[in-house]
Image (cartoon, grey):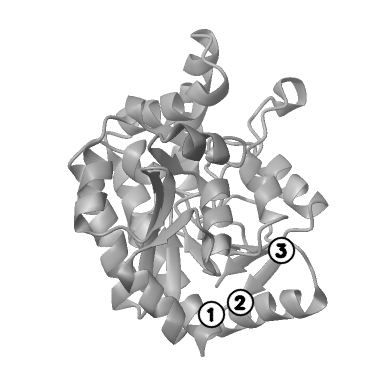
Amino acid sequence: MHSLIALSPETSQALAEGRPLVALESTIITHGMPYPQNLEVAQQVEAAVREAGAVPATIAVMGGRIRVGLDAGALEALASTPAAQVMKLSRADLAACLALGRTGATTVAATMICAHLAGIEVFATGGIGGVHRGAETSFDISADLQELAQSPVTVVAAGAKAILDLPKTLEVLETLGVPVIAFGQDQLPAFWSRESGLAAPLRMDDPAQIAASARRRRELGLAGGQLVVNPIPPEAEIPRAEMIPVVEQALAEAEAQGIAAKAVTPFLLQRIFELTQGRSLEANVALVLNNARLAARIAAAMAS
């Protein structure tokens, strides 16, 4: 095992025994919601993975090492640290955070890198980053897309965040050769909504098929992972027709206030939370739990 990686005893034992493991990111804990709600949700997500038959491994950088699997004390410490004191880590700043001895929360890209180093093949998140609207002038494209083309990890998400340019995100994933597999439906889901109006490139209805696809990619020597887009449960969704005007309003406000770069997404998510009177966050929690359950089923199929 890599010297920069510190496995929790539970994670270490699960790896040694070949039991199914699901990696979980930490940005949702540090930058996704306030304390103590963030801790409660993190505990719920870990519990959902366990109930579905796998071992959860939440990943974060703490004390100069990559922690894979956080015990109750570490999870509490991370959740209660003010967001301003935690670096938000992607591929570009993961090594710097370790070198500086800072605390860091892993985004999709950084979690994929760390999961792969630890030998974990499946990762559950909320939504991936993607191509921002206006990217043809700003060039604002998330590093998550490139990471999916590089790190051999199967990522389960509810699609790309619906504040993004979804058609362009799909185009970039296609260019990078990333398989985008919709679970149980033909349309690409759009995070808070089950439908985006876009056809998914691939569809699979069984976790075993997704696990087999990952195996075949490895046998073919293909780099990168798979993106499994899992629609939010019907009872928790905010339909697309309802979300489009909300997203448009938040985007217009961001532009009017000159908000740019890394500040855009937090601003938009906060405004959407306000405009939906908290429903967007409830939907977010429901979809993360749903993704954790599916990821556990895929991990179990890979382990068998």
Identify the residue at horizontal 34%, vertical 25% (top origin). 84
Position of 230 with respect to 227 (left or right) is left
From the image, tell me which residue sits under label 1.
207
**Distance between mark 3 and mark 2 Cα atoms:** 10 Å
Whether residue 155 is visible, yes or no, is no
Circle on res. 179: 3
Pick the front one: 119 or 163: 119
Q: Which amino acid does label 2 sit on?
A: Ile
Q: Earlier in the sequence, mark 3 or mark 1?
A: 3
> Label 2 neighbourhood size at 10 Å, few (<14), some (14-19), many (20+)?
many
Pick the front one: 251 or 100: 100
Q: What residue type is labelled 1?
A: Pro
Circle on res. 76: none
**Distance between mark 3 and mark 1 Cα atoms:** 15 Å
**Distance between mark 2 and mark 1 Cα atoms:** 5 Å
Q: What residue type is labelled 3?
A: Pro
From the image, tell me which residue sits under label 2.
210
Q: Do the residues labelled 3 and 1 touch (CB within 8 Å)?
A: no
Q: In the rendering, at what x and y percent does residue 260 appear?
A: 56, 17
Q: What element carries label 1?
A: helix
> Label 1 neighbourhood size at 10 Å, few (<14), some (14-19), many (20+)?
some
Q: Which of marks 3 and 2 is nearer the N terminus?
A: 3
